[in-house]
Amino acid sequence: MSIRAPYGATKKRKVVGRGTGTGRGCTSGRGNKGQKSRSGYKRKIGFEGGQMPLARRLPKRGFNNSMFERGYQVINLNDLNRYKSGQKVNYELLREDRLVNGKSQRVKLLAKGELKKKLILEVHHASDKACEAVRAAGGEVRILKG
C-alpha cells in the first residue's frame, strides 16, 4: 500500500506545444512575439517594463554613520551583586560569567537596580548615577580608554 498526497496537494504539469486542439498549441500560452515569448527570458527583480522603477522614483532620505559607531555592552548595578565585596570586575570576568558576549569589548555601566557590594569596576563608560551608586557602596569606578 502506498501513501498518496491529499487531493489538491499536487497539480498536473501543463503539456504545451502539442497541437491547436489541446488549447495550448501554437504559441504555448506565451502570447504573440516579443521578449517574453522567447526562450531564455528572465525579468530583473524590480523591472517595471521600462518605466522608472519605484526604488529610483523615491528620494533618498536619512544618514547612517554606523561605520564609526561605538557599540557598548550594557551591564546594570543589580547584575554585579553576584561578586564578592572588594573584587575587581573587568571585561574578562564579565565575559566568563556571561554577563556580556563577544560582540563588543566595550562595557557601559548603567544605574538600574541597587549595588550592595564594595567593588572595583573597570568599564569603558558609566552613567553619572551609576558612578554615584558605586561610590556610595564604597566601591570605585575606573574608566578605561579605547
Image (cartoon, helix red, strand yellow):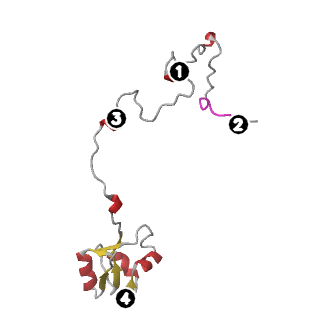
Name the N-terminal-most of marks 3 and 4: 3
Looking at the rendered structure, the kind of residue marked 3 is Leu
Of labels 2 and 3, the one closer to you: 3
The residue labelled by disc 2 is 3
Q: Residues within 10 Å of mark 3 (few under 14, many from 20)?
A: few
The residue labelled by disc 3 is 54
Q: Residue furthest top?
A: 21
Give the residues drawn in magenta, as a range. 3-10
The residue labelled by disc 4 is 85
Q: Quadrant of residue 10?
A: top right
The residue labelled by disc 1 is 37
Q: Are marks 2 and 1 in contact (CB under 8 Å)?
A: no
- Whole-percent x and y of residue 114? 30, 78
Magenta stretch: residue 5 in it? yes
Name the N-terminal-most of marks 4 and 2: 2
Label 1 SS: helix
Q: Is residue 38 above or below residue 26?
A: below
Please give left or right for residue 122 compared with residue 17 in the image: left
Distance from label 2 to label 3 (Cα)?
A: 48 Å
Q: Are marks 3 and 1 in contact (CB under 8 Å)?
A: no
Label 2 SS: loop
Distance from label 3 to label 4 (Cα)?
A: 61 Å
Magenta stretch: residue 13 in it? no
Label 3 SS: helix
Name the N-terminal-most of marks 2 and 3: 2
- Whole-percent x and y of residue 96? 47, 77
Closer to the camera in the image, 64 or 135: 64
Distance from label 4 to label 1 (Cα)?
A: 79 Å
Residue 99, labelled with which disc? Answer: none
Looking at the rendered structure, the kind of residue marked 4 is Ser
Looking at the rendered structure, the kind of residue marked 2 is Ile
Closer to the camera in the image, 111 or 13: 13
